[in-house]
Image (cartoon, helix red, strand yellow):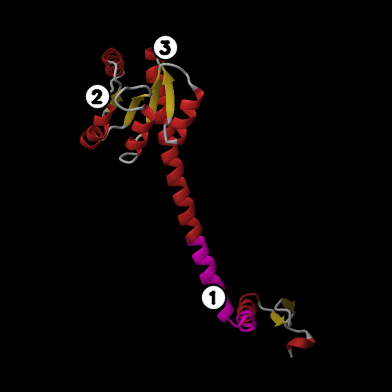
Amino acid sequence: RPILVVDDDPMVVRVTEAALKQGNYLTVSTLDPTQAVALIRKHDPCLILLDVNMPQMDGLRALALIREHTSAPVIMVTGQGNEEVIRGAVRLGASDYIVKDADFLENLVRVIERTQVQLTLKAQLVRSKKEVLLRSGELTLLLDATMAISSHLDLDRVLNILCEQINRAIGCTFVTSSSLSCSAMPLNSPASS
């Protein structure tokens, strides 16, 4: 699955695509953020790089529109590290951001890899939570079944049967008390007569 690059600057798109191809990533791109949804439907990108400042549509509006069509991670690309814009993007579902500065291309692949690792870990966490819930449900059912079965048993009778079996196996008499415990009595004691 490709990475979708959405930026109104053709030079940024070209160098971004070149850096991604060098990192063995497939890319698809557009200079027009209004075309992003069509490309998402057509190519189902694994990740989206979205410029914040574009004349056709603000990056935050484009992000809100993109979120209606995909849950793929979106990394906001900005010319400046405007904290308010970045917080707004995160609230709308952006996974990360990168600043277009002198280190942009050097940091690009690292930010993408970090985002993909986070996505993988999040998916593993969801699977683990589901498994824990499933196991918890199984244990609850087992406990409920055990409680239901034990509530229908005559425990005095079960204890007497167990004591009789032990008596046959080891050769002494077990007497049950009202507190449901067994006590051993030698076979030649007065209680056994």
> How far apart are labels 3 and 1 at the CA level?
68 Å
Q: Is residue 145 visible?
A: yes
> How far apart are labels 1 and 2 at the CA level?
64 Å
Q: Quadrant of the C terminus?
A: bottom right
Q: Quadrant of the N terminus?
A: top left
- Tell me the amino acid under the disc marked 1: Ala
At mark 1, the secondary structure is helix
- Tell me the amino acid under the disc marked 2: Thr
In the picture shown, does residue 142 fall above or below 16?
below
- Residue under pointer 2: 30
* Residue 152 falls within the magenta-colored stretch: yes
Observer-nearest residue: 123 or 180?
123
- Residue under pointer 3: 101
- Label 3 or label 1, whichever lies nearer to me, is 3
Magenta-colored span: 138-160
- Label 1 or label 2, whichever lies nearer to me, is 2
Determine crowd level at label 2: few under 14, some 14-19, many 20+ residues with C-alpha closer than 10 A. some
- Tell me the amino acid under the disc marked 3: Asp
Q: Residue at x 26, y 15 (%)?
A: 10
Q: Main secondary structure of the magenta part?
A: helix
Which residue lies most toward the front here? 55
Of callouts 3 and 2, which one flags the residue occurring earlier in the amino acid sequence? 2
In the picture shown, does residue 103 fall above or below 162?
above
Of callouts 1 and 2, which one flags the residue occurring earlier in the amino acid sequence? 2
